[in-house]
Image (cartoon, grey):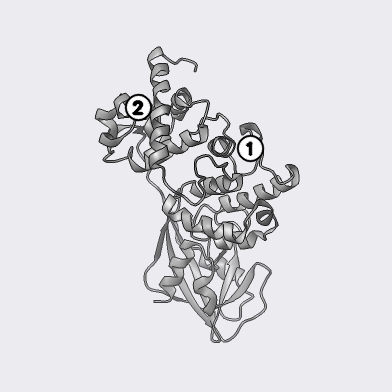
Amino acid sequence: MDHATKTEIALGQKIAPPMLDWYDQHRRHLPWRHDPGIKANPYYVWMSEIMLQQTTVATVKSYFEKFTNLWPDISDMANAPLEDILQEWAGLGYYARARNLHKCAQTIMQDFNGQFPETEAELLMLPGIGPYTAAAIASIAFNQRAVVVDGNIERVMSRVFKSYAELPKERAEFYRLANLATPDSRVGDYAQSLMDLGATICTPKSPKCAICPIQPHCLGKLEAEGLPRKAPKKIKPTRKGLSLWITTLDGYLLLERRPEKGLLGKMPGLPGTDWIEGQEPDIDTLMQKMQFLPKLEHQLAEGEAKHTFTHFHLFLSVGKITLSNTCDLPHNYFWLSLDQLDEFGLPTVFKKAVSLAQR
């Protein structure tokens, strides 16, 4: 509690009791969440927290249920082929999370005898687990006192303490404030109560202050929509690329397994050029790479597939090529029956390219 004022300390001590009372009555019922009095499943907590990074609860629910049906426990996940996990992850985005999910499961089986470590320090040693996730697992799954701070909790802390700290450069200030308010018992329930409050009541716009359980203690309620302060968003650059829709007369589509390193690593996709900012797609280099095919003349589909990644916008042209039949392929390419395409786990950007090619 370094640098904390008496006012901050007193305010921090007032937050947990009403939040826990509110949580007992109004908590969200989520497929990975345990009921009061029942110990949480660490496997469920871990998987849900990895899936929820940069993704909404509504989107994650169906993926979580699918994954836990396919791989009910940590050993099932560790023994699954990475390609299967990546394919089922398709559409959830940020594919490094899926690769780390698999690697983390294997590490737990090999180094921790299949049991999740219970402390933040040990959890931080695992692949794909950073400070927030380690604190969330330690508190929710093992009821260890850990300071959990996600975007919802940053927003609640900024308003309750009326903090003008700016995101992202002053993020440590919200950790300091959250530490003042974190109780010594029911830590996991308390962390989840703040997550729920931020998702349903203390929302970014039009917060429902009138029904907030900690509204009487909130110093920033009169200027809630202006908190937390955020640095202006940087303008995202635009990149361009060309993907190839290569099909055969007997109903097969050529796909490429992308390199392990880089964006969408090890995911299947349409063959294509690199995605480059400030220049047109390098079609000549692509055609040289595809010389194992007997025919390379392509016709451009009308329009472009548009997709936004974390750091850039992508405009993807699609070239259409029809071959008389399949042929032998290098190891990172494979043929897929067009009948299986709708159920196949292509990343969203390539689903958009497929839609453009099929118009």
Residue that lies at the very extreme toward the front in this rendered image: 37
Q: Is residue 355 left or right of residue 98?
A: left
Q: Give the residue drawn at x 61%, y 33%.
A: 120
Judge the density around disc 1: few (<14), some (14-19), many (≥20) Cα neighbours within 10 Å: many
Q: Is residue 120 visible?
A: yes
From the viewer's side, name the closer residue of 45 and 161. 45
Q: Position of residue 252 (x, y in %)?
A: 56, 80
Judge the density around disc 2: few (<14), some (14-19), many (≥20) Cα neighbours within 10 Å: many
291 vs 192: above or below: below
Q: Secondary structure at mark 2?
A: helix
287 vs 179: above or below: below
Residue type at mark 2 is Val
Q: Which residue is mark 2?
A: 160
150 vs 352: above or below: above
70 vs 354: above or below: above
Going from N to C along the chain, the mark reached first, 1 or 2, is 1
From the viewer's side, name the closer residue of 206 and 256. 206
